[in-house]
């Protein structure tokens, strides 16, 4: 759309649609025109689902995963090993790991990584709650599954140091994932193998 558009309403809708990641203006226009062809009640249901999502979604009080309730379905699951915690950067990493069907423990979402350039320090992440989980529960292993770039490695080392006073094994996923790659873009086989073939975190530091 451009300044010659016949409808400012369509132009505004395209602006909003194209603000989503991965959607260019041509795709946004196609989606907007498709929505325009749908019934009014369908459009209302479509838009209300996002309004409800924003106003009612919760974050699990234990792991900070998205949830409809106080505890997410993973933390509530009786068949999972809750003595095993996989530490991830964000919720998209949980979805990626779950898609492998190779991991049956619990998670902890940091909500980011330490990045001084972006003004993000340890206190801006869900690290204190992780330490509390380890100190208050019988945790057998912490798996650090963060992106293999400088920020991810810095965050991993910080966590390793903070967890060192506890008698808890700290491991990291095997680097079948290319350095710098996001977990959400890794193929399921490679990501699954990297979880299964994890190694002691101290070994990764030595390398």
Image (spheres, grey):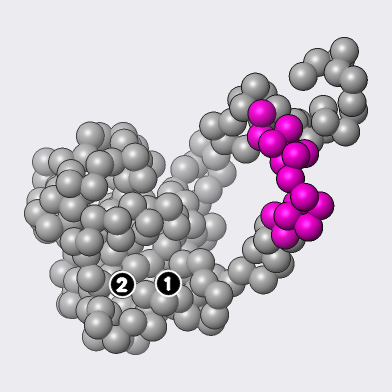
Return the residue nearer the eye: 105 or 119.
Answer: 105
Vertical comparison of 50 with 78: above or below: above
Residue for point 38% across, 83% down: 76
Horizontal and vertical percent position of residue 22: 54, 32
Residue 112 position, x and y percent, is 47, 51
Find residue 63 and name its label. 1
Task: Please give the range of residues in magenta.
Answer: 30-47
Residue 126, x across and y down, in percent = 47, 65
Callout 2–callout 1 Cβ contact below 8 Å:
yes
Instruction: Give the Cα separation between the discs numbered 2 and 1.
Output: 8 Å
What label does residue 106 carry, if any? 2
Secondary structure under the numbered disc 2 in the rendered image: strand
Q: Residues within 10 Å of mark 1 (few under 14, many from 20)?
A: many
Is 49 included in the stretch rendered in magenta?
Answer: no
Residue at x-position 43% and y-position 52%: 92
Residue at horizontal 70 percent and vertical 27 percent from the top: 29
| Image side of residue 140 versus residue 43, left or right | left
**Looking at the rendering, which quadrant does residue 138 occupy?**
bottom left
- When the figure is inspected, residue 145 is found, relative to residue 15, above or below; the finding is below
Q: Is residue 185 visible?
A: yes
**In which quadrant of the rendered image does the N terminus lie?**
top right
Tell which of 104 and 136 is nearer to you. 104
Looking at the image, residue 10 sits to the left or right of residue 74; the answer is right
Quarter-wise, where is residue 152 in the image?
top left
Task: Considering the whole magenta stretch, tell me its main secondary structure.
Answer: helix
The disc label shown at residue 90, or none: none
Looking at the image, is 122 positioned above or below residue 130? above
Q: Secondary structure at mark 1?
A: loop
């Amino acid at each position: 759309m451009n300044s010659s558009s016949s409808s400012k309403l369509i132009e505004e809708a395209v602006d909003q649609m194209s603000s989503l990641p991965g959607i260019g203006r041509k795709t946004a226009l196609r989606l907007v025109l498709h929505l325009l062809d749908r019934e009014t009640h369908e459009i209302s249901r479509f838009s209300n689902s996002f309004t409800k999502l924003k106003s009612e979604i919760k974050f699990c009080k234990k792991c900070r995963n998205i949830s409809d309730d106080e505890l997410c379905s993973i933390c509530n699951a009786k068949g999972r090993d809750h003595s095993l915690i996989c530490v991830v950067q964000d919720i998209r990493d949980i979805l990626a790991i779950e898609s492998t069907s190779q991991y049956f423990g619990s998670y902890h979402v940091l909500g980011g990584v330490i990045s001084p350039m972006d003004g993000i320090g340890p206190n801006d992440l869900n690290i204190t709650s992780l330490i509390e989980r380890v100190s208050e529960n019988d945790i057998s292993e912490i798996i650090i599954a963060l992106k293999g770039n400088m920020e991810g490695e810095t965050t991993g080392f910080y966590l390793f140091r903070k967890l060192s006073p506890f008698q808890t094994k700290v491991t990291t996923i095997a680097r079948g994932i290319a350095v710098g790659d996001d977990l959400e873009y890794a193929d399921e086989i490679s990501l699954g193998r990297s979880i299964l073939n994890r190694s002691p975190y101290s070994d990764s530091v030595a390398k």
